[in-house]
Amino acid sequence: MVRASYENVLEKHLEALGAPRELPVVVCGMAGSRQGWQEARYLTVPASLKDIVSKAVRVTDAQRDIRILPGLAQRDQARADVMRGEETQLLGGLADTDPAGLACLPGTHSKWARFASGHISGFSTYMTGELFGLLATKSILRHAVGTGGEFDPTRVDFVEAVRDGLQHATEISRMLFSLRALQLLYDRPQIAGYARLSGLLIGSEIAAAKMEFGTPDIVHLIASGKLSDLYQSAFSALDIATRRVDADQAVVTGLITAARHFWPQPDRQIHLGNVKA
Protein backbone atom coordinates (compact mmCIF):
# COMPACT_ATOMS: atom_id res chain seq x y z
CA MET A 1 0.00 0.00 0.00
CA VAL A 2 1.40 3.42 -0.94
CA ARG A 3 1.81 5.93 1.87
CA ALA A 4 -1.05 8.16 0.70
CA SER A 5 -3.41 5.19 0.89
CA TYR A 6 -2.90 4.84 4.63
CA GLU A 7 -4.18 8.34 5.25
CA ASN A 8 -7.08 7.88 2.84
CA VAL A 9 -8.21 4.69 4.59
CA LEU A 10 -7.88 6.26 8.02
CA GLU A 11 -9.76 9.40 7.01
CA LYS A 12 -12.63 7.37 5.55
CA HIS A 13 -13.02 5.50 8.84
CA LEU A 14 -12.82 8.69 10.89
CA GLU A 15 -15.34 10.38 8.61
CA ALA A 16 -17.74 7.47 9.12
CA LEU A 17 -17.40 8.03 12.86
CA GLY A 18 -18.02 11.74 12.52
CA ALA A 19 -14.55 12.57 13.88
CA PRO A 20 -13.51 16.23 13.62
CA ARG A 21 -10.47 17.25 11.56
CA GLU A 22 -8.49 18.30 14.61
CA LEU A 23 -8.87 14.91 16.32
CA PRO A 24 -5.42 13.33 16.90
CA VAL A 25 -4.71 9.63 16.29
CA VAL A 26 -2.31 7.11 17.80
CA VAL A 27 -1.45 3.99 15.80
CA CYS A 28 0.50 0.78 16.44
CA GLY A 29 1.41 -2.20 14.30
CA MET A 30 2.65 -2.58 10.74
CA ALA A 31 1.86 1.01 9.75
CA GLY A 32 5.21 1.76 11.38
CA SER A 33 7.17 -0.84 9.40
CA ARG A 34 9.74 -0.02 6.73
CA GLN A 35 7.12 -0.76 4.07
CA GLY A 36 4.33 0.96 6.02
CA TRP A 37 3.04 4.49 6.36
CA GLN A 38 6.11 5.93 8.07
CA GLU A 39 8.86 3.95 9.70
CA ALA A 40 8.94 3.94 13.49
CA ARG A 41 12.32 2.38 14.14
CA TYR A 42 12.54 -0.60 16.46
CA LEU A 43 13.66 -0.05 20.04
CA THR A 44 16.41 -2.42 21.09
CA VAL A 45 15.76 -4.62 24.12
CA PRO A 46 16.29 -4.37 26.99
CA ALA A 47 13.86 -1.50 26.73
CA SER A 48 11.38 0.26 28.96
CA LEU A 49 7.74 -0.05 27.99
CA LYS A 50 7.50 3.70 28.59
CA ASP A 51 10.05 4.22 25.80
CA ILE A 52 7.56 2.71 23.35
CA VAL A 53 5.52 5.86 23.92
CA SER A 54 8.33 8.40 24.18
CA LYS A 55 10.00 7.16 20.97
CA ALA A 56 6.86 7.30 18.82
CA VAL A 57 7.13 9.15 15.50
CA ARG A 58 4.78 11.77 14.15
CA VAL A 59 3.58 11.28 10.56
CA THR A 60 5.17 14.18 8.74
CA ASP A 61 2.78 14.73 5.84
CA ALA A 62 -0.60 13.96 7.46
CA GLN A 63 -3.42 16.45 7.73
CA ARG A 64 -3.89 15.74 11.43
CA ASP A 65 -1.64 14.87 14.38
CA ILE A 66 -0.87 11.15 13.99
CA ARG A 67 1.67 9.25 16.11
CA ILE A 68 2.96 5.76 15.33
CA LEU A 69 4.41 3.61 18.10
CA PRO A 70 7.66 1.71 17.45
CA GLY A 71 8.17 -2.02 17.74
CA LEU A 72 10.90 -3.89 19.62
CA ALA A 73 14.03 -5.58 18.29
CA GLN A 74 16.39 -8.13 19.77
CA ARG A 75 19.71 -7.33 18.11
CA ASP A 76 21.56 -10.55 18.78
CA GLN A 77 22.63 -12.43 15.67
CA ALA A 78 22.17 -15.73 17.47
CA ARG A 79 18.61 -14.83 18.54
CA ALA A 80 17.61 -11.97 16.25
CA ASP A 81 13.92 -11.10 16.64
CA VAL A 82 11.39 -8.31 16.10
CA MET A 83 7.82 -7.45 17.07
CA ARG A 84 5.32 -4.80 16.00
CA GLY A 85 1.95 -4.40 17.66
CA GLU A 86 2.58 -6.86 20.46
CA GLU A 87 4.65 -4.26 22.34
CA THR A 88 1.48 -2.18 22.71
CA GLN A 89 -0.36 -5.22 24.07
CA LEU A 90 2.47 -5.65 26.58
CA LEU A 91 2.24 -1.97 27.51
CA GLY A 92 -1.46 -2.35 28.27
CA GLY A 93 -1.55 -5.94 29.46
CA LEU A 94 1.25 -5.70 32.01
CA ALA A 95 0.16 -2.43 33.57
CA ASP A 96 -1.09 -4.02 36.81
CA THR A 97 1.23 -7.01 37.13
CA ASP A 98 3.96 -8.16 39.47
CA PRO A 99 7.43 -6.64 39.07
CA ALA A 100 8.76 -9.52 36.96
CA GLY A 101 7.44 -12.39 34.91
CA LEU A 102 6.88 -14.03 31.55
CA ALA A 103 4.21 -13.14 29.01
CA CYS A 104 2.83 -15.28 26.17
CA LEU A 105 1.05 -13.64 23.23
CA PRO A 106 -0.31 -16.38 20.93
CA GLY A 107 -0.94 -15.72 17.26
CA THR A 108 0.28 -16.39 13.75
CA HIS A 109 3.70 -15.59 15.16
CA SER A 110 3.47 -16.23 18.90
CA LYS A 111 5.58 -14.01 21.13
CA TRP A 112 7.03 -14.83 24.54
CA ALA A 113 8.55 -11.92 26.45
CA ARG A 114 10.44 -11.66 29.73
CA PHE A 115 9.71 -8.50 31.69
CA ALA A 116 10.79 -6.90 34.95
CA SER A 117 9.88 -3.55 36.52
CA GLY A 118 8.34 -2.18 33.34
CA HIS A 119 11.19 -3.33 31.07
CA ILE A 120 11.28 -6.01 28.37
CA SER A 121 14.61 -7.80 28.73
CA GLY A 122 14.17 -10.33 25.93
CA PHE A 123 11.65 -12.12 23.76
CA SER A 124 11.24 -14.90 21.22
CA THR A 125 8.89 -15.52 18.32
CA TYR A 126 7.48 -18.94 17.40
CA MET A 127 5.76 -19.38 14.02
CA THR A 128 3.17 -21.71 15.53
CA GLY A 129 0.09 -20.25 13.88
CA GLU A 130 1.66 -19.94 10.45
CA LEU A 131 3.09 -23.44 10.61
CA PHE A 132 -0.33 -24.78 11.57
CA GLY A 133 -1.91 -23.06 8.58
CA LEU A 134 0.72 -24.30 6.14
CA LEU A 135 0.72 -27.87 7.42
CA ALA A 136 -3.08 -28.07 7.53
CA THR A 137 -3.60 -26.73 4.01
CA LYS A 138 -0.38 -27.19 1.98
CA SER A 139 1.26 -30.38 3.25
CA ILE A 140 0.40 -34.05 3.06
CA LEU A 141 -1.21 -33.64 6.48
CA ARG A 142 -4.14 -31.86 4.84
CA HIS A 143 -5.62 -35.29 4.15
CA ALA A 144 -5.47 -36.16 7.84
CA VAL A 145 -6.87 -32.92 9.24
CA GLY A 146 -9.32 -31.79 6.55
CA THR A 147 -10.81 -28.33 6.86
CA GLY A 148 -10.80 -28.66 10.63
CA GLY A 149 -13.17 -26.41 12.49
CA GLU A 150 -13.98 -25.59 16.08
CA PHE A 151 -13.18 -28.19 18.71
CA ASP A 152 -13.44 -28.28 22.47
CA PRO A 153 -10.10 -27.04 23.90
CA THR A 154 -10.35 -29.78 26.54
CA ARG A 155 -10.69 -32.48 23.84
CA VAL A 156 -8.45 -35.43 24.69
CA ASP A 157 -6.72 -35.42 21.27
CA PHE A 158 -5.60 -31.84 21.84
CA VAL A 159 -4.59 -32.23 25.49
CA GLU A 160 -2.59 -35.41 24.90
CA ALA A 161 -0.86 -33.81 21.92
CA VAL A 162 0.13 -30.80 24.02
CA ARG A 163 1.81 -33.12 26.51
CA ASP A 164 3.49 -35.09 23.70
CA GLY A 165 4.69 -31.89 22.05
CA LEU A 166 6.20 -30.71 25.32
CA GLN A 167 7.84 -33.99 26.31
CA HIS A 168 9.11 -34.97 22.84
CA ALA A 169 9.72 -31.62 21.16
CA THR A 170 12.86 -32.89 19.43
CA GLU A 171 10.69 -35.47 17.65
CA ILE A 172 8.15 -32.98 16.33
CA SER A 173 8.75 -33.93 12.68
CA ARG A 174 8.08 -37.60 13.40
CA MET A 175 5.02 -36.85 15.49
CA LEU A 176 3.58 -34.64 12.77
CA PHE A 177 3.83 -37.37 10.15
CA SER A 178 2.20 -39.81 12.54
CA LEU A 179 -1.04 -37.83 12.03
CA ARG A 180 -1.12 -39.14 8.46
CA ALA A 181 -0.32 -42.68 9.60
CA LEU A 182 -3.01 -42.63 12.29
CA GLN A 183 -5.61 -41.71 9.71
CA LEU A 184 -4.50 -44.35 7.20
CA LEU A 185 -4.04 -47.22 9.64
CA TYR A 186 -6.72 -46.52 12.23
CA ASP A 187 -9.20 -44.36 10.31
CA ARG A 188 -8.86 -41.53 12.79
CA PRO A 189 -11.42 -38.77 12.06
CA GLN A 190 -10.06 -35.57 10.58
CA ILE A 191 -11.21 -33.44 13.52
CA ALA A 192 -9.01 -35.62 15.77
CA GLY A 193 -6.06 -34.98 13.50
CA TYR A 194 -6.86 -31.28 13.41
CA ALA A 195 -6.92 -31.06 17.21
CA ARG A 196 -3.77 -33.14 17.56
CA LEU A 197 -1.89 -30.98 15.03
CA SER A 198 -2.78 -27.90 17.05
CA GLY A 199 -1.74 -29.54 20.31
CA LEU A 200 1.60 -30.81 19.02
CA LEU A 201 2.62 -27.39 17.75
CA ILE A 202 1.50 -25.53 20.87
CA GLY A 203 3.18 -28.12 23.11
CA SER A 204 6.47 -27.83 21.23
CA GLU A 205 6.22 -24.03 21.41
CA ILE A 206 5.84 -24.19 25.19
CA ALA A 207 8.76 -26.62 25.39
CA ALA A 208 10.99 -24.21 23.47
CA ALA A 209 9.90 -21.27 25.62
CA LYS A 210 10.59 -23.22 28.83
CA MET A 211 14.03 -24.15 27.52
CA GLU A 212 14.84 -20.48 26.89
CA PHE A 213 13.10 -18.73 29.79
CA GLY A 214 12.87 -21.50 32.40
CA THR A 215 9.74 -22.81 34.08
CA PRO A 216 7.71 -19.81 35.23
CA ASP A 217 5.59 -19.61 38.37
CA ILE A 218 2.90 -18.03 36.23
CA VAL A 219 2.47 -17.10 32.56
CA HIS A 220 0.70 -13.86 31.68
CA LEU A 221 -1.46 -15.06 28.78
CA ILE A 222 -2.38 -12.10 26.57
CA ALA A 223 -4.83 -13.50 24.02
CA SER A 224 -8.40 -13.33 22.78
CA GLY A 225 -11.07 -15.70 21.51
CA LYS A 226 -10.28 -19.27 20.49
CA LEU A 227 -6.52 -18.86 20.93
CA SER A 228 -6.97 -17.77 24.51
CA ASP A 229 -9.02 -20.88 25.27
CA LEU A 230 -6.59 -23.22 23.47
CA TYR A 231 -3.52 -21.89 25.25
CA GLN A 232 -5.31 -21.82 28.58
CA SER A 233 -6.22 -25.48 28.12
CA ALA A 234 -2.63 -26.28 27.14
CA PHE A 235 -1.18 -24.54 30.19
CA SER A 236 -3.72 -26.23 32.45
CA ALA A 237 -2.79 -29.65 31.03
CA LEU A 238 0.85 -28.90 31.87
CA ASP A 239 0.04 -27.57 35.36
CA ILE A 240 1.31 -24.08 34.49
CA ALA A 241 -0.55 -21.27 36.23
CA THR A 242 -1.77 -18.37 34.11
CA ARG A 243 -3.04 -14.84 34.42
CA ARG A 244 -5.36 -14.23 31.46
CA VAL A 245 -5.55 -10.82 29.81
CA ASP A 246 -7.82 -10.09 26.86
CA ALA A 247 -5.52 -9.09 23.99
CA ASP A 248 -8.03 -6.70 22.42
CA GLN A 249 -8.45 -4.87 25.71
CA ALA A 250 -4.70 -4.87 26.27
CA VAL A 251 -3.99 -3.07 23.00
CA VAL A 252 -6.71 -0.50 23.74
CA THR A 253 -5.23 0.10 27.19
CA GLY A 254 -1.77 0.48 25.66
CA LEU A 255 -3.03 2.98 23.11
CA ILE A 256 -4.87 4.93 25.80
CA THR A 257 -1.64 5.08 27.80
CA ALA A 258 0.15 6.49 24.77
CA ALA A 259 -2.64 8.96 23.99
CA ARG A 260 -2.59 10.35 27.53
CA HIS A 261 1.15 10.93 27.15
CA PHE A 262 0.85 12.74 23.82
CA TRP A 263 -2.26 14.74 24.65
CA PRO A 264 -2.59 15.02 28.44
CA GLN A 265 -5.63 17.34 28.40
CA PRO A 266 -8.28 15.38 30.33
CA ASP A 267 -11.18 16.71 28.25
CA ARG A 268 -9.66 16.00 24.84
CA GLN A 269 -11.03 13.16 22.75
CA ILE A 270 -8.54 10.68 21.31
CA HIS A 271 -9.16 8.22 18.46
CA LEU A 272 -7.48 4.88 19.05
CA GLY A 273 -6.57 2.55 16.21
CA ASN A 274 -4.38 -0.45 15.44
CA VAL A 275 -3.62 0.06 11.75
CA LYS A 276 -2.21 -3.01 10.01
CA ALA A 277 -2.95 -2.07 6.40
Image: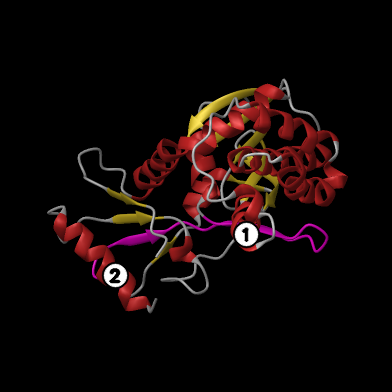
Q: Residue at x 42, y 40 (%)?
A: 248
In this rendering, would 176 be left or right of 31? right
Q: Position of residue 275 (x, y in %)?
A: 38, 59
Q: Nearer the viewer, residue 239 or 164?
A: 164
Q: Say which amino acid is labelled 2.
A: Glu
Tell which of 117 and 205 is nearer to you.
205
Residue 136 figure quarter: bottom right
Three-letter code, disc 1: Leu
Q: Please state the total of marks drawn on the protein image.
A: 2
Residue wearing tag 1: 134
- Where residue 114 sits, quadrant-wise, is top right
Where 39 falls versus 152 (above or below)? below
Tell whether 261 sits left or right of 161. left
Q: Residue at x 68, y 39 (%)?
A: 188
Please tell me which residue lies in front, 19 or 47. Answer: 19
Question: Residue 145: image x %, image y %?
Answer: 62, 48
Q: In which quarter of the image is residue 203?
A: top right
Q: Residue 3 location, x and y as percent?
A: 37, 77
Between the C-alphas of marks 2 and 1, the distance is 33 Å
| Disc 1 element | helix
- Name the residue beneath numbered marker 2: 7
Find residue 147 and report its horizontal and vertical position in percent. 53, 50
Lateral position of residue 58 relative to residue 232, left or right: left
Query: Which residues are the magenta region?
Result: 62-84
**Residue 211 is at least partly visible in this image:** yes
Q: Quadrant of the C terminus?
A: bottom left
